[in-house]
Amino acid sequence: MSWAAHEFENYFIQKHVGVKASFLGIVVGTQLPDLFTKSFVYAADDPAKFHRGWPGVGFTHSLIFGFAFAVLILAVTKSRSWAVGILIGQWAHVLTDFADSAGTMPFFPFSIEPVTIEMWKHAAAEGRYGDAAAYYSSLGGVWDAFWLVVVLVFAREALSPRYFRTTIVPADPKVWGWLHRRLRLPEVGLLLFYWGFFFYGLGRMTSWFLYARIEADAPLDWGWAGPWWVEGNDLSTAGLAEVFVRTAVGGVLFALFLYLCWRLFVRRLWDRGVDPPVVQRGSGLDAVFGAGRS
Amino acid sequence: MNDDPPVEGLPPAAWFVVTFVVYVILGLVVKSTVLNWIIGPLWLLITLFLLPTMVRRARARVGGG
């Protein structure tokens, strides 16, 4: 699993969707797969299988889960920017978690084959602290640092007060307005809340890294599939070709499923959905990415 | 040129460094209390806005009383 990467990627995504998605929607989306499951993962008999496999709660790390949740939000709130935010946030989480040894099932239920590049070991079997020590002793910690650099290099503007004023609030005026009125938070309070997710990522990355070095005294292993001192958690015995074929079939079926859903009911929900006044959506990818201001 | 009005009440950068160091140290000492999805994202808001606001109000009340 990835740790602080899920906080950093919020800002990178936001920078690329501009006013077309709610930042808080993206945050909910990126946290969604672990939101209902993470507390139970460490107590499970086989944490990796429970977290990412089937049977288990591995479906939370599939693209269909984000799609279903986004459609539900669109149906209930009619907010397009929240639906888009949740969808791309959750999908980003699924893609980010490809990297550990347990992988994710992106096209569940059409394929239950985990997809992984095994950059580091899924170490939930070691308990929360052991997991942290293993993650921040392997390429997992480097993955977090990579996302931090990506934000600072490619999305630094998203951290500026100006961006908050001109993009974050206009993309979601109802919720930020509610926080302002209901909780009596002035602009500085809202801005600190907005920065809070970045701060949390940086803070927990630093704390857990120091914990791994000082308290756990865990040896660093920045080789592929490290750390060596944790047992592997590969959920599949399938060969590369088998994984490729199953995933490709699953992907095609998933795309067909999305198309059918779009034709049958999602398009109707989208058409009756509403956007904040500042948003001007095009069609196709332009509905999600780009400046999109009226 | 940046002609945006400044954010009123925004603490100086040094305070961000201080609260970061405090957070990291507390993270090492009381891990589950601060390194979680509730306290973590709210830490900046709590330490740089809510607490100073409460202290200011308490001081004003004491001074006024």
Image (cartoon, coloured by chain):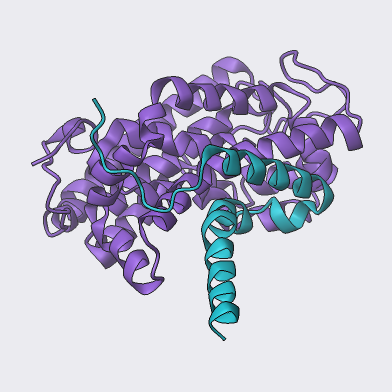
Chain colours: A purple, B cyan
Q: Position of residue A44 (x, y in %)?
A: 77, 54
- Quadrant showing the N terminus of chain A: top right
Q: Which residue is outermost to the left?
A: A294
Say which of A27 and A39 sits in front. A27
Side (left or right) of A63 relative to B35:
left
Residue A156: quarter of image: top left
Can residue A105 be seen in the rendering of this structure? no
Residue appearing at x 68%, y 27% in the figure: A141
Residue appearing at x 76%, y 55% in the figure: B32
Q: Position of residue A9 (x, y in %)?
A: 47, 34
Say which of A13 and A83 sits in front. A13
Q: Position of residue A110 (x, y in %)?
A: 45, 40
Residue A217: quarter of image: top right
Side (left or right) of A42 relative to A259:
right
Reply above or below: A115 against A196: above
Residue appearing at x 59%, y 68% in the figure: B55
Q: Which residue is outermost to the bottom?
A: B65
Residue A290: quarter of image: top left
Say which of B7 and A275 sits in front. B7
- Quadrant showing the C terminus of chain A: top left
